[in-house]
């Protein structure tokens, strides 16, 4: 049996090639992949033209073919070869033009000459091609033909959602996006790690929280979803995470919610501090994904982000270089495990109170050495500290932060204290 | 047309020579200068002997002449030559004395041998002369004649006040002092910068705040004023500044109010941080001017101070070296502009709230590039951050501090967001 | 007349040799010593077998004799020579054993080969001997005889208490322990410093607070006492201190209460900051004495600790090396004086408010120089700052912390301000 890292990498390789956009056949293929892994996934559909808050759902974008030919009819660029060659939501065109005219429709990255950039123009009619700067420099004067057979069809914007019920209505959100074509770390990694978390949560024997997993086109997808579900989320959501850029094996990163100290933030920071202490912290001023909507004034949901290398911080970002070689089984597994620990921390996070006023007599319960010797007590330090700080006021994450103990490692100790009836949960 | 700096320097040179004291002809000349610039200036008069809180208004002090002669009748010191030669509020004397006897009435600064020190004895009958230490060392044994023709006249202590009405009763105070004879940075600079601010405020088309400008002898003047106006100030005053030592071109300095985090403090710190980031911070423990009264327990007004080099921190302070060469057009202009920016910040400082729950669609309003490319959004960062932090809870200064944006530079952006009806003021 | 340091050292030499345990003749001897110094000391008795919270009072432990003989009948270890040779609460034994069998009952410190360790087994029946590691290495194979004539007698656990009434029911606690045999810094120093503080407090002319001095076996003694007095302490106790390891002349140390910012903590930190600024701070996570009970969740008393070198931080700790050479007159006196200053700070700690709104006229009261000269006011700075910060909101310790003044040195200034009716106490 392969490990979770290998499975996640295999899934990335399946999800990566789909030509996703805000709404396109590639998006549908992605949702079909998800339904294969998460049979209870539901799809919400928002019709083109519908107003969602200040935004309007765009039409679907279908591309039959798109290429660029030189004067001798040789195809020098073809959408078939790489989805990034075509500016997202390009309008149809069939036009002959000089190199100078053509240049105004080309996009490349001089500082990354071997990368095809990722460019979109969702809300302004445009057409354009993207290519490596190396290739662009080789273009010679002459006539070119640009052909884009694209159609804008009144259709729907799709948002996938899996809800996993728990013992309470309090819920935890994981949100990832499904609109970037052929990029591996951004965004395929987020899709597969979220999928694996959904599977893992679904098979838990007990869940104090309910869990909501969202797969939505970035920005407009979360806006559309919020336009229909905001009051309920504001009532129930206790912590949420935007899952993105979770596939490489370089950094661990944490991006704060706007509130900075929500339960989600505290859980993420605690897990990272004890398991990946060299993680990088980004303030909400460096935000860039759907936390922009979730943490918006008036929305104010407790949503932060754990990433590996943050978007914008790795050179392959938003280009054809963000391919399968950027992500790795260990990179994906590290993210999955970090989020799993967040869930474990959140599930365990309650207010404990020590029973009885003074210290209990531990040695008679086998919880403390009966022979008192110089320097002998260090191995029971966490147990003693938990007992000294369980006052029913701080929650478990706060207590573990305070006493400098890893919450995950403390769970068996807490279990033992509960069995010995030395502590109790404060409702 | 000369710039504001040159104008201010010209004014200093007019104000500097007056032989001010707590109450003296020089003070009257200064108030006449002020009425020339600020025709609506009113003068409050507090009669000698009047009790103001724990203090008593002293008599007026008039000096006909004062000099020191050596045995051969040569005048070696003359009040005519420099006002600082005479200890402030010296009693009359006409006495022949030996050098040893004379020494007990002389004041000089061994560590600054070319400076005449500034010495006063307002509340204890005394007489004395001040001279450079160089000169003092040259005095030879022998007889000297000390003559001081001074009179103490029951009169009034004068406080100049200009009130400029605004749209609301909330008000901003600028306070400076008019009791130091022949010193340029301390205190002439404060008088002229305050005057220029009063002129500038008076011609503003709109003023949310009312403005009060006070010109009062230090300590007793502000105490006298507060003894009659405290309840009203406590009701209306939202921010205040003591304007002193604002003429040299070395440091920018900020001295905190006792409350430390009043609106005045926050405005001052914000302006200095973005326009003079190397400014020096002084705690209220290093106070020395009328903030001592304004921030007194039981008075508790929100008053701090922006200075250039703080009193006591520059070598020429409280001596004849604090002359016209210490101040400069650029030094004065820098202070004027800093305070102007404080006023602009205070006028603009309100609570804004973003309209609508999620991010608005900016590109359709021309507020965001319609083509999404790697790294393209940096120039709209302040706009995006203002929208993300306008939650109606933080005021504008807090928001700008939080997002790291210069409030003054942000004003046109805010104007544009208001025009597009993307934000609103929370009353 | 000898100084307090010499007296304290003499007392340590009297208290040190008693063979204290939780309950033993040595404990009774110690309480008799205390009654000699504090005639009003009362003894609380808790009968063996009594339940005190989660704990049970153990029997008394009486040792007639205890020694180890080699095969030729030579006594190689004898309890008569050092109390630490015998594991505390050893059960009786008279047994012949091989060296290998004997080893399982021996305790030594390889890293401190000349020290006899301190070992106890209060709550699990055991026997054992402690010896230097040097001696242990010299033991040769052969037969040994272990003889321990000890008895467990139903008796009482004794807690000594002195209550010194003050003007109010608010009280200050000093707690030290009486259960360690033949160790000088831990614990004899605590006993004698607490005794001296009790004597000093008793002879004060005025006491705003009542004072409670406890001499109790560590842990079980404080638990037993709390089991009968908790509600009253929770009602009245305003600050408390665990007095331990106060005899050596190396560090000054402060161990925080669990609450971290109680009145006791603030007093201790203020005194140490101004009188022993290089003191070491230990968090409550490094606790080890009766603050474990006093600060327990549900008990929550404001109790911290000032020590010289903290237990566990000096090499002689919990061994025969913690003898009379570790403590010194100056070490003991330093602790006594620090705690005395805490009491002075607590007694003086109230809320003062300046009378009248602005600054009072100080020079007419002789509180400020009447001649105003450059740089002349520094010696009245504390007086001015006290007047500027006495707003009736901060207590005296907070004000002194804020203005950077030593509270103890400020007391005569405050006295003078009260005499001049410039300040008043806010009830």
Image: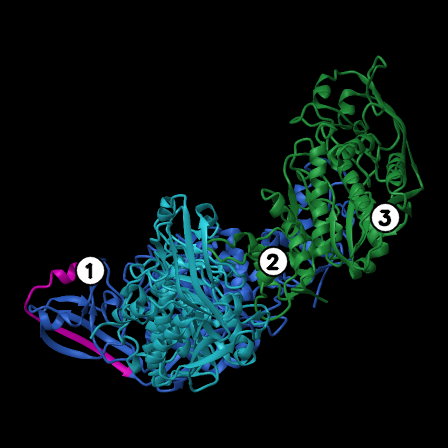
Chain colours: A green, B blue, C cyan
Q: Is residue A155 left or right of residue A300?
A: right
Number of residues whose C-alpha sits closer than 10 Å to that of mark 2, classed few (under 14), some (14–19) or many (20 or more): few
Nearest the eye: A247 or C180:
C180
Residue that protrudes farthest toward the front in the picture: C72
Q: Is residue C411 above or below residue A23?
A: below
Number of residues whose C-alpha sits closer than 10 Å to that of mark 1, classed few (under 14), some (14–19) or many (20 or more): few
Q: Which residue is the site of mark 1?
A: B110
Say which chain tag 3 marks: A
Q: Secondary structure at mark 2?
A: loop
Q: CA distance from mark 1 to mark 3?
A: 84 Å
State yes or no: discs 3 and 2 in contact (Cβ < 8 Å).
no
Q: Secondary structure at mark 1?
A: loop
Determine the image quadrant of residue B417.
Answer: bottom right
Q: Nearer the viewer, mark 3 or mark 2?
A: 2
> What is the span of residues highlighted in magenta in the rendered image?
B134-152
State yes or no: discs 1 and 2 in contact (Cβ < 8 Å).
no
Nearest the eye: B75 or B379:
B379
**Residue C361 in view, yes or no:** no
Q: Residue C414, how many percent across, how many down?
A: 36, 78
Q: Residue C228, how many percent across, how many down?
A: 54, 79
User: Which numbered dot is residue C310?
Assistant: none
Residue that protrudes farthest toward the right in the picture: A154
**Residue A90 in view, yes or no:** yes
Q: Is residue C81 magenta?
A: no
Q: Is residue C38 left or right of residue C353?
A: left
Q: Which residue is the site of mark 2?
A: A366
Q: CA distance from mark 3 to mark 2?
A: 45 Å
Q: Secondary structure at mark 3?
A: strand
User: Which numbered dot is residue A162?
Assistant: 3
Q: Earlier in the sequence, mark 3 or mark 2?
A: 3
């Amino acid at each position: 049996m392969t490990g979770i890292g290998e499975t996640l990498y295999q899934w990335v390789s399946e999800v990566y090639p789909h030509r996703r956009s805000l709404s396109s056949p590639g998006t549908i293929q992605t949702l079909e992949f998800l339904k294969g892994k998460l049979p209870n996934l539901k799809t919400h559909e928002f019709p083109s033209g519908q107003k969602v808050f200040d935004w309007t759902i765009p039409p679907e974008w279908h591309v039959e073919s798109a290429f660029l030919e030189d004067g001798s009819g040789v195809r020098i660029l073809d959408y078939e070869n790489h989805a990034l060659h075509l500016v997202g939501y390009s309008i149809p065109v069939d036009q002959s033009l000089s190199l100078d005219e053509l240049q105004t429709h080309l996009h490349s990255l001089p500082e990354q000459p071997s990368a095809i950039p990722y460019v979109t123009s969702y809300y302004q009619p445009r057409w354009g091609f993207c290519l490596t700067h190396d290739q662009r420099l080789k273009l010679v004067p002459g006539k070119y033909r640009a052909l884009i057979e694209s159609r804008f069809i009144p259709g729907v914007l799709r948002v996938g959602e899996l809800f996993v019920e728990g013992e309470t209505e309090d819920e935890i959100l994981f949100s990832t996006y499904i609109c970037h074509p052929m990029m591996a770390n951004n965004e395929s990694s987020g899709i597969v790690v979220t999928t694996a978390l959904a599977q893992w949560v679904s098979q838990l024997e007990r869940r104090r929280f309910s869990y909501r997993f969202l797969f939505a086109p970035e920005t407009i997808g979360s806006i559309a979803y919020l336009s229909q579900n905001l009051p309920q989320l504001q009532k129930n959501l206790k912590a949420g995470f935007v899952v993105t850029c979770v596939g490489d094996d370089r950094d661990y990163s944490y991006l704060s919610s706007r509130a900075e100290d929500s339960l989600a933030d505290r859980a993420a920071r605690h897990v990272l501090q004890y398991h990946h202490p060299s993680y990088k912290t980004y303030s909400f001023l460096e935000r860039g994904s759907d936390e922009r909507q979730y943490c918006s004034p008036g929305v104010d949901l407790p949503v932060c982000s754990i990433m590996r290398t943050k978007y914008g911080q790795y050179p392959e970002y938003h280009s054809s270089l963000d391919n399968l070689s950027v992500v790795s089984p260990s990179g994906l597994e590290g993210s999955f495990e970090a989020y799993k620990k967040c869930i474990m921390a959140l599930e365990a996070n309650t207010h404990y109170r020590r029973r009885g006023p003074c210290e209990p007599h531990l040695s008679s319960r086998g919880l403390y050495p009966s022979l008192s010797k110089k320097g002998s007590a260090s191995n029971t330090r966490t147990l003693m500290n938990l007992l000294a700080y369980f006052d029913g006021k701080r929650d478990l994450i706060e207590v573990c932060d305070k006493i400098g103990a890893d919450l995950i490692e403390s769970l068996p100790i807490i279990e033992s204290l509960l069995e010995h009836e030395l502590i109790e949960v404060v409702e």
